Image: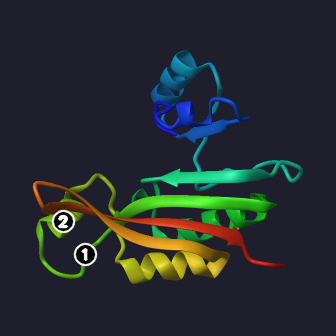
Amino acid sequence: CGPGTNAPWFENQDYLGIDINEDYVAEARQRHRREFMVADVREYEAPPDQHFDFILLNSLMHHIDTPDVERMLEQLSHQLTDDGYIHVLDLVLPKNPSIARWLAHSDRGDFPRPLDEWERLFTRHFDTVIFEPYPLGKAGVTLWNMVYFKGRAKAR
């Protein structure tokens, strides 16, 4: 959740923000007066009776290695309600040399992934509702390539 950047979007909803950085969580609590928790999302497991109808991972997984992403997505697939969705926005590693590829490698995250790898990770655990790559840029120059994914837990 960082310092609670997305919390205002959920003003009238139950909300839980999780971040490993104690300073971010302290700032988020002070600014938003909502529920925030210091935890490592790679290991966090909600109590078995707690489920979510909306899970947002915003620019997180390119900081996490693939085995931990796999475990995390598996766990999250069990935490969704039957009518819930996971929403993911994350950095895409372009295949060809470009400014966007250089910036992806320069980011603090050590695990930017190509689009096809993101799709494989998501669809292993979720049914796709939306899988949409999009560029972020300025003056017609793509600086970042991103992907938006919306999915439902696979039927069990």
Amino acid at pointer 2: Ala
> Looking at the image, which is closer to me, 147 or 20?
147
Is residue 45 visible in the rendered image? The answer is no
- Tell me how far mark 2 sits from mark 1, CA to CA: 7 Å
Check the image and name the residue furthest to the right: 49
For the C terminus, the quadrant is bottom right
Q: Position of residue 8 (x, y in %)?
A: 54, 30
Amino acid at pointer 1: Pro
Q: Position of residue 125 (x, y in %)?
A: 65, 76
Q: Is residue 144 left or right of residue 18?
A: left
| Location of mark 1 (residue) | 94
The dot on residue 100 is 2
Q: Are marks 2 and 1 in contact (CB under 8 Å)?
A: yes
Residue at figure coordinates x 51%, y 38% from the top left: 6
Residue at figure coordinates x 45%, y 75% from the top left: 118
Other residues around mark 2 within 10 Å, as few (<14) / some (14–19) / many (≥20): many
Q: Position of residue 57 (x, y in %)?
A: 53, 54
Is 66 rendered above or below residue 137?
Answer: below
Is 99 rendered above or below residue 58?
Answer: below
Q: On the image, which quarter does residue 141 sit in?
A: bottom left
Is residue 101 visible in the rendered image? The answer is yes
Secondary structure state at the residue bearing disc 2:
helix
Secondary structure state at the residue bearing disc 1:
loop
Q: Position of residue 64 (x, y in %)?
A: 45, 61
Q: Is residue 121 left or right of residue 111?
A: right
